[in-house]
Amino acid sequence: MGKRKQILVDLTPLLDVILIILFMFVARAEAAGSSNNLSSEQKKLDNTKKEYEKIQRETNSLQALDKACKTITVSIKSEKDSDKRSLIIQLEKEDEEKIEIDSNDTTYAKNKLKTKLNDEFLKLKDDEKIALIVFQYDNNLVYNSDYNFVDEVLKKVQKGNEKIYLSYYDTSEQKDNNKEKD
């Protein structure tokens, strides 16, 4: 029998090929992961864009409402531990006017409110705007007599004028909702 030669198999090139293939798989996995991140970032961007467009529409609506409508806020403020009550009238962006309500006689406050509103609506007749009167009150703090006299004046002012709209807003409901969230 003859001499056998030893065959030397060099596996280094095979190891290089296996490492190259392994790096390709890792690179593809990272690319797929980054495309998932990219798609989630795209979704976030799309949602942000939709929110921006919604806010833009609301802003445009508010600007249009501001041009077509004069807003007057009438509110009654009562202090919890006191009989002090006041009627507050605010005309759009102007300073508010505060009128103290006398417990025994609401005639002064009633007349002052009626005069102020009528003066504003005389200005409004020449204009094409409508008027929105928002009556704000806290149902837990407001006196029934105060609510009734303000309601009566607002309805008298509105009567016969199709450009005047009334809105009633009970702020106690808002406070109750905030307590539930806490």
Image (tube, grey):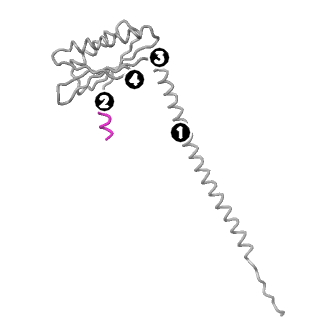
* SS category of the residue bearing label 3: helix
Residue 3 higher or lower than 63, as above or below: below
Q: Position of residue 50 (x, y in %)?
A: 54, 35
Q: Amino acid at mark 3?
A: Ala
Residues packed near mark 1 inside 10 Å, few (<14), some (14 to 19) or many (20 plus): few
Magenta highlight on residue 154: no
Task: Give the alpha-carbon distance from disc 3 to disc 1, as whole Å.
Answer: 30 Å
Quarter occupied by the C terminus: top left
As measured in the structure, the alpha-carbon distance from the residue carrying label 4 to the one carrying label 1 is 31 Å
Q: Judge from the rendering whether residue 115 lies leftward or rightward of residue 2; answer left or right.
A: left
> Which quarter of the figure has residue 173?
top left
Q: Is residue 153 left or right of residue 106?
A: right
Mark 3, residue position: 68
User: Badge 2: few (under 14), some or many (20 or more) residues near its Cα, within 10 Å?
Assistant: few
Q: Nearer the viewer, mark 2 or mark 1?
A: 1
Residue appearing at x 81%, y 90% in the figure: 4
Marks 2,3: beta carbons within 8 A: no
In magenta stretch: residue 178: yes
* Distance Cα–Cα, label 4 vs label 3: 15 Å
- 12 or 161: nearer the eye? 161
**Mark 3 neighbour class, 10 Å CA radius: few under 14, some 14 to 19, many 20 or more:** some
In the picture of the structure, the residue carrying the numbered disc 2 is: 173
Q: Would you name the residue on which mark 4 appears?
A: 93
For marks 4 and 1, the one nearer the N-term is: 1
Query: Furthest residue to the bottom?
Result: 1
Q: Which residues are magenta?
A: 175-182
Q: Position of residue 119 (x, y in %)?
A: 35, 10
